[in-house]
Image (cartoon, grey):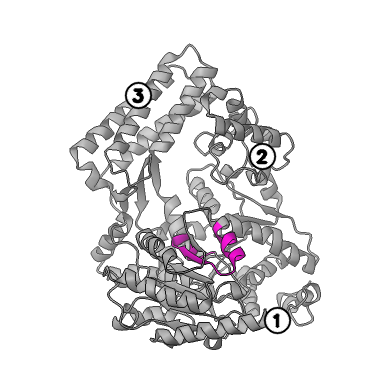
Amino acid sequence: MTSVKQTFAPDGALAKAIDGFSPRQAQLDMALAIEASIKQKQALVVEAGTGTGKTFAYLIPALLSNKKAIISTGTKNLQEQLFHRDLPIIKKALGSNKRTVLLKGRSNYLCLHRLRQHSGNSTLVDKNVLGQLTQVRQWASSTKSGDMGELKSLPEDARVLPLVTSTVDNCLGKDCPDYEDCYLVKARRQALDAEVVVVNHHLFFADMALKNTGFGELIPESDLVVFDEAHQIPDIATEYFGENLSSRQLRELCEEVELIYRTALKDAGQLSKAADKLKMQLADLRLLYPDTPQKGNWVESLAEETIRAQVERISDSLEFLYEVIKTHLGRDKDLDNCFERCSQARTLLDKLCDVQKKGVSLWYETTPRHIVLHLTPLSIAKRFAEFMAEPPRSWVFTSATLMVDDGFEHFTRQMGIDEPQTLALDSPFDYDSQAMLCVPRFLPEPSDWAMREHLVNIAQRLIEASGGRCFLLFTSHAMLNDIAKVLPDKIDNPVLVQGSMSKRALLDEYLSSKNGVLLGTGAFWEGVDVRGQDLTCVLIDKLPFASPDDPLLQARIEDCRKSGANPFARLQIPRAVITLKQGAGRLIRDNSDKGVLVICDNRLVTRDYGKTFLGSLPPMRRTRTLDDAVQFLEQITQEDSQTS
């Protein structure tokens, strides 16, 4: 049998199958470390710098082993790229016939039962949704997988999707009349039979949370679990280890009760009345908060008399709906399911109003129409450690951004990973010649209002020198919007602003423009891969510390203080370092890329903790003089014009 080392050799399987493949020592080192981890059933944590080729480094040991593997990626897009592009190349090179499956979350699969429920009730949906429903019905007659992603004519946020897909709440499971034809069930069966299953982090942890309740288990057992983009895991796992209840969730419950009354149980008028009453009470609670979406401390909110009184009314209405449904149990399977959901919601609402509970944060967030209540554990380390321990298997956590202060302690402590093997691999890029980092002199403090004018002036000079081809990354929507209002009048380049269209459409527009300037926040700090001449400058407005108003962060800070630790050093700095590394990582994506990174925050040089941030960034040439950055950009622009 071919070994990992032979596969990566200059005359190995990859070199023979892939034009232009050349061995990289860091890639081989990572692959060999994973091979050892598989044999010894150990946990391995790897920071692999951009350009290492980590995808091949973990896929090849996984395919060459005789083990069952789960590969979990950060997003659905990365999941599909890995499955449709990378895996076929490697399988062909290795001559592997291992069964590989792409598994998505349940909301990605058509639910035949819900499609039939809504198809005969056009009076319950408006004309736009009715048109989408017609498209789904036509596609449903020919699809083999039931993957809603096949239906390219539907927008990602199509309003019909919740009507024709299922949730954990409304799925009837084995009681469903369409169970044997269920696309989700078929996908899971394929996953059980496959040797490599490709998922995303949200699906992995949603399933892990269900395992703790004794059912669900969408993801099959495996011998090896690989997490790519592992820096995202702590936040995603925390989300699924907590509990939440939203007014949208309860409203959908009410709408389903209404649908059952109108179709199956027309003699049960009380169902409609009870559902309407609860819907009104939920709407009234949302009206007690400002129109602008916000997050806040739920314990403090409950202390307000008006909020507490309204929550009590919702509790009473939920109880009333529960009692009404109870009188019709056994008459309709969907209504029986609504009864279970109603019962769970009552229990969960009580739990979310228990302000004495320790070790958790109780917080809320509002959207334009709804409110979500959250109960979030302050630490997931213990639960994740227990999950890793049983049964023994190999775990690989990898990302370009896991280390802080040259160590993995921040990540491993968050995840409860005890004494793992660790490996730090530098990027193969020559950052000293390819890139420059500029922290301009004479900047006001980041919170100073005058910073807006400075940012516009700096951006103007950079955009002129680079001929566009810039990302301006912001730590807040407020700053992004302020600059977006002013910048278009100062430059002739196309200005593309996050929120004006979908992320994919915005990137396509940017790439086709050839001289565009993209203004983005959160979503554009990671998972965006723009190579070559299309991106030569990244500007970051300030160090990306999390908002001090975030209620979950506040609770963690308080908990950290109680344990005698320094929350700024233990929580806030490491998180900001990893985010900054992600943003900086947008600039150099290839051996031939060149560019300038400008960080407009003098705290990098005036505060002691600035050394931690600078030490975590790639080894670019550094300057405090904006003229140097402009000159380097002009040089890159001139070289590009000569070669194009």
Q: Which amino acid type is shown beneath numbered disc 3?
A: Lys
Kind of element beneath mark 2: helix
Tag 2 residue: 183
Which span is picked out in magenta? 506-527
> In this image, 249 relative to 360: left or right?
right
Mark 2 Cα shell of 10 Å, populated few (<14), some (14-19), many (≥20)? many
Residue at image coords 19%, 41%: 304
Give yes or no for contact between labels 3 and 1 (Cβ–Cβ under 8 Å).
no
Where residue 578 sits in the image (x, y, percent)?
43, 70
Q: Residue furthest top?
A: 267
Does 526 appear in magenta? yes
Give the mark nearer the N terminus: 3 vs 1. Answer: 1
Is 544 drawn above or below residue 28 in the view shown? above
Check residue 23 in the rendering and tell me which mark sits there, or answer none: 1
**Nearer to the camera, 188 or 372:** 372
Q: Residue at x 25, y 61 (%)?
A: 558
Is 311 within the magenta?
no
Q: In the rendered image of this protein, does residue 433 appear above or below residue 95?
A: below
**Residue position for label 3:** 277
Q: CA distance from mark 1 to mark 2?
A: 41 Å
* Real-space CA distance between mark 2 and mark 3, rounded to the nearest whole angstrom: 35 Å
Q: Position of residue 540 (x, y in %)?
A: 42, 72
Instruction: Tell me where residue 571 sits by quadrant.
Output: bottom left
